[in-house]
Amino acid sequence: MATFVISDLHLSFGTNKPMDVFGEKWNDYEAKIEQDWKSKVKAEDFVIIAGDVSWATYLEEVLEDFKWIDKLPGTKIILKGNHDYWWETVTKMNRFLEANNITSIRFLYNNCIETDKYLVCGTRYWAPEEGMDNTKIFNREIQRAKISLDEAKAKNSEGINKPIVMCTHYPPDELILGVLKDYNISKWIYAHIHSNYIEHIVEIPNIESYLTSCDYLDFTLLEI
């Protein structure tokens, strides 16, 4: 089995918000991703999508995007991004998947998902910004990260002994790295930074880190 990563798909099969307004490289990008995905991923593999899955505003509007993802091979682990306005409670989203016969999507939200190789943890994150008081949001996201990581820690203490993969939509910074430094994180997946902002790529000491925005990856999946 293999684990792949990608993010910032910004799908709009159920809405009208094409990505080619951001440049020619986005022309027919869904087909590029699909072709590469099918060439690499097998049914037993996992694909982590680190947020910004769809431009949909409401859960009902994301159905066509989910169907597109569902027909691709592998189990998909989806994290919330800052543009995923359709995101609801896990219970409501799981019921939506079940009602629409979508079977290959799992949501990473206040939990830890075990794969054959890894314990996958995550939260959207949102660092405090200059001139804005985002303390409440920051504290909430840190709490969600700890809930996810504590579950992984408990699993490993029971003898599972798998590396921990931490996923955030926003890139990590010294604040979150400092708070989570004792969780023995092996790999860190992040998103949000598109190819025209690569000067903001983050390197984390002693942790393998991966920027996964699809345009940065040239609309291909990266195996970790």
Image (tube, rainbow, N blue to C red):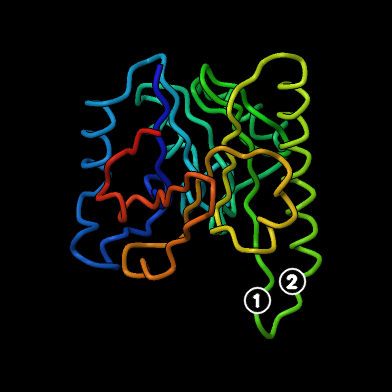
Residue under label 2: 134
Q: Is residue 85 left or right of residue 50?
A: right
Residue at horizontal 63%, vertical 42%? 122
Residue 216, image x and y in percent?
A: 31, 55
* Number of residues whose C-alpha sits closer than 10 Å to that of mark 2, classed few (under 14), some (14–19) or many (20 or more): some
How far apart are the two marked residues, 2 and 1, measured between alpha carbons? Answer: 7 Å
Tag 2–tag 1 contact (CB < 8 Å): yes
Image x and y of residue 124, in percent: 62, 52
Report the residue marked by disc 1: 129
Compared across the picture, whether 137 is left or right of 28 comes to right
Q: Amino acid at mark 2?
A: Asn
Q: Quadrant of the N terminus?
A: top left
Looking at the picture, does residue 38 appear above or below residue 198? above
Q: Residue, x 44% and y 68% (percent of image)?
A: 200
Mark 2 or mark 1: whose residue is earlier in sequence: 1
Front-lying residue, 141 or 175:
175
Disc 1 crowd rating (10 Å Cα; few below 14, some 14-19, many 20+) is: few
